[in-house]
Amino acid sequence: MEQELRKEARKLLDEGKADHIVGFARGSLKFTATPLITREKEEVASLVINPFIVNNLAKFLTEVPGRVGIVAKGCDSRSVVSLIQDNQVSRDDVVIIGVPCSGLIDIAKVEQLVNKDRDEIDDIALQGEKVAVIIGGQKTELPTKEVLFEHCLGCESPTPQEYDILVGIPTNAIGDKELSLRRIKQLEDMVPEQRWAFWKKQLSRCIRCYACRQVCPACFCERCFVEESQPQWISPVSQWQDNLMFQVIRNIHVAGRCTDCGECERVCPQNIPLRSLSKKMSELVDEMFHYQAGIDKDAPALMTAYEPVEAEDLIM
Ligand code: SF4
Ligand code: SF4
Ligand code: SF4
């Protein structure tokens, strides 16, 4: 797949069909990948595809000039579609190089299960329902479900639905919806006072670094409400009530745009379970408006369309 990807990316640059390629290169740490944005033909030889390509590259589409050839997993391609629906990106300015995805491995889970630091691990290979971990020449097999990110376990479209070029063959992620929604279910089972106490405790730890916002392709406002001073919607000081307000407003802003890529939760340095908010919001959007983010580039964005019947449900 990597060879095919490099060939297609090179062809796009050679034929002038893309000004930049946005993909992944090997990261500086073991079992990581890093975004690669290049217009250099030689550099496309560094493109990689592996179970560690965690970033949602759609984030770069509003920043990279010209026509962009973007490597997109299923959730990334839905974010691209969502940006097209919001008129942030023109379909003509993007060449989607779809990459069928088998799920992403959370290296922290592997480290915990094998009780080793990543530097002590020689190799990790995703092999269907098992993940082979090689340490000192010895192979250990782990159940894939136990090492994938939770959002991948709930993924319904790991193969991009919108693409110009598809590299490799369509895949199915090793899903487990129940496991994917386990933490949300636990929160739903709480009484409101418990839930309030839970989020108060979690959001008291927020240091307002805004990494969750910076990494999210659905957060594309040129000026974020948190930076407004007139009116000042929330205090810049990190106190739990304002942190809560930040997340509540952010989640309303990404409603109908969030594709459950899991990036906000992954990058949070305080390990705040942000997906429990964003995924719950997506479920509510689906329930109330029968709308899933990034499915149809020709459909109006959720917040730009109104059906008279909706008011009845919302007001009553
Ligand atoms: S959510 Fe789906 S497409 Fe996205 S990384 Fe996980 S399995 Fe792949
Ligand atoms: S990434 Fe985490 S710590 Fe940083 S602002 Fe977001 S919730 Fe707070
Ligand atoms: S809110 Fe989080 S999960 Fe949703 S699109 Fe943004 S980064 Fe991805």
Image (cartoon, rainbow, N blue to C red):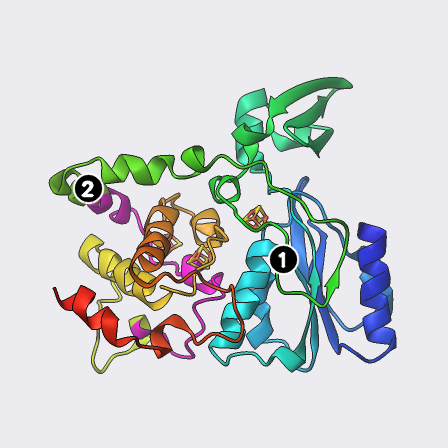
Residue type, mark 2 in image: Arg
- Which residue in the rendered view is the most extreme toward the top? 138
Q: Is residue 165 above or below residue 152?
A: below
Q: Is residue 167 above or below residue 11?
A: above
Question: Which residue is pictured at 59% across the width and 69% down the height?
Answer: 60
Tell me, yes or no, if residue 238 can be seen here: no
Q: Position of residue 217 (x, y in %)?
A: 49, 66
Question: Which residue is pictured at 63% across the width and 32% down the height?
Answer: 118
Which image quarter is the C terminus in? bottom left
Q: Position of residue 253 (x, y in %)?
A: 34, 68
Q: Secondary structure at mark 1?
A: loop
Location of mark 1 (residue): 160
Q: CA distance from mark 2 to mark 1?
A: 35 Å
Q: Which residues are magenta?
A: 199-225
Tell me, yes or no, if residue 215 can be seen here: yes
Tell me the crowding category of disc 2: few under 14, some 14 to 19, or many 20 or more residues within 10 angstroms, Cα based: some
Q: Is residue 113 left or right of residue 254?
A: right
Tell me the crowding category of disc 1: few under 14, some 14 to 19, or many 20 or more residues within 10 angstroms, Cα based: many
Q: Position of residue 258 (x, y in %)?
A: 43, 60
Location of mark 2 (residue): 195
